[in-house]
Amino acid sequence: MKDFFVFVFFLLVLGASSAFAEGVELDEAELACLKCHDKAGLKMKTEKGETLPLSISTQAFRESMHNKTSCEDCHDNLDSKEHGKEPSHVASKREFSLEMSKSCTSCHKENVKLYVDTVHAALIRDGSDKAPTCSDCHNSHTVKSVKIVTPLEQIPCARCHEDIFKAYSKDVHGLERVAKGKTGPQCSDCHSAHSIQAASLGDAIKNNCVKCHKDVAVSHEDWLPNAALHFDVISCPVCHAPDAQRRVNLRMIDSVDKKQLIEQKGVPKFERLAQSADQQKAGMSEQELKTFLKEFNLENTGNKAILNGRLEVRSGVQAHQLAEKSRAIKDCRVCHTAGATPFQSIVLTIAGQDGRPLRHSVEKEVLSSITAGGSLHGFYAIGSTRIKLLDYLLLIVVSGVLLVIVGHMTARRMFRSRREKLKEQRHSDFMQSQFDAESQSENETKGK
C-alpha cells in the first residue's frame, strides 16, 4: 500500500512538472520582444565596461512563473516604438539590477515588505555591492514555482555563502535533500528567504528546528536534566555538530523586554566603548567589562543593558556541519567539567545597524567574576563556570550551618553538669516534700 501511494505521488509530481514544462501561449507583444531577444549571444556593454546579457529563451519564459506577465509590466520605462533604434545606456550591471528590482514591488508586495527589514536590505542601504537584490536569487525570465524541487547545485545562496553551502551539502540536511528531494530542508526553510536575519541573533533558528523536530522537547526530557533550560541557553549545533568549536556568547539584551539590543544609528557606541575599555586589546577583563557596561548604560537612552549568556558554535560553517542523530553529543562532561573547552572562548555581542552581529572578545575569567555576576543573566554551568559570588554565598550558608551545629553541641556540653545538678536538686526537693508530707500525716493521726 505504501508503494502505491509513493507511485501516485510520483505521477502527480510528474504531471505538475509536465504542466509547467508545456508553459502557456504568449501574447503578440511578448512574442515581438522575444523575436529580437531570443537570439543567442545578444548582449550589450554597460558604461562601466561590463557585459550585460540580453538573450532570453522563448521556451524558458513560457515555462516560467512570469509567463503571464507582460514585458512592459516590468520594463515600463521603455518606449516600444523607439526601443532598439538607439543604444541603451546602463551605468552598471549592479545599478541595472537595483533599478529592475523596484518593479517587483508591483506584484510581490508582501515579500518586498518582509525583505525591507532583512540583513540583505540593510546591507544594500549601506552601499554594499554584494548583498542580493531580487534578481540575484530569482531570474525574472526563468523563475520556477517553489513547488518544484530546486536541485542542490541551483540554490542561489551558494553564490555568496560558498563555504557555508559546501558544509551544508555534506551535512545531514544536505545529504537528505540529495537523497529525498523536497523532504530535506534547504537554506530558505531555516533562514526564511524574504525575512532573513543574522542567525547568531535571537532564537529564530532554534524555533525553526522545532518546526520539523516537533518532539524534541519531550524526547530530550527523557535523558537530559533541565531540558528546557538547556534549550534556552544552548544553540542546537552545539550538540548536533560534534566536531565544531564552541564558545560563550554574551548577548547584550534589554533588561525589561529581554530583546537583543541593536547598535544605535548616528553615533555608534558599542565598538567605541569596547575599544576604550579593553586597554590591553586582548579581550576585556571582568573590571573592564563592568566599566564598559557602566559607560554604555550612562549613554543609553532606553532601559538598562544586561548580558544574556548562550553557548554556540564559533562560525556559520560549523553551524552547517550537523551530523546524524547517533553522533550528537550526550556526554554531560563535555561542558560540565572544570576547565571545559566551550568556556575558554567568550565574546560580547550586540546587533549592528545592518543586522549583523558586532563582537568583542572577553577574558574567560569573566564567567567566574563577582563584579560581572549582576550583569550575567542566569548563565551558570555546574562544574565548569564557577561564579565566585555564588561560591561565597554557599560558603556563608555552609559556615552558618556548621556554626549552629558546633554551637549547639558546645552549649549542650557546657550546661550538661548544671542540668544534672538541677535534676538532682529537683529530685531531692521532691523526696523531701514527700517525707515532710508523710511526717505531717503521721503527726495528725497521733493527735487524734
Image (cartoon, rainbow, N blue to C red):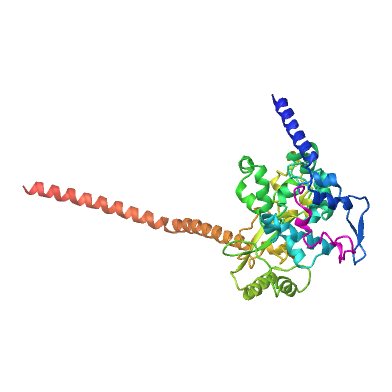
Tag count: 0
In the image, residue 258 above or below residue 324: below
Q: Residue 97, how many percent across, how many down?
A: 81, 60
Q: Which residue ends up furthest to the top in the rendered image?
A: 1
Q: As rendered, which of 439 and 398 lies closer to the eye?
A: 398
Tell me where residue 353 sits by quadrant: bottom right
Q: Which residue ends up furthest to the front in the rendered image?
A: 81
| Residue drawn at the location 58% of the way across and 60% of the way down | 395
Tell me where residue 8 sits by quadrant: top right
Q: Quadrant of the N terminus?
A: top right
Viewer can see residue 339:
no
Q: Which residue ends up furthest to the left in the rendered image?
A: 448
Q: Residue 74, how many percent across, how many down?
A: 77, 57
Q: Residue 307, how many percent across, how many down?
A: 64, 63
The stretch of residues the image draws in magenta is 66-93
2 with respect to 87 (left or right): left
Residue 70 within the magenta-colored segment of the rendering: yes
Main SS, magenta residues: loop
Q: As rendered, which of 36 and 274 lies closer to the eye?
A: 36
| Residue drawn at the location 74% of the way across and 75% of the way down | 276
Q: As rendered, which of 432 and 292 lies closer to the eye?
A: 292
Viewer can see residue 410:
yes
Q: Residue 337, how many percent across, how many down?
A: 70, 51
Q: As rendered, which of 177 and 216 lies closer to the eye?
A: 177
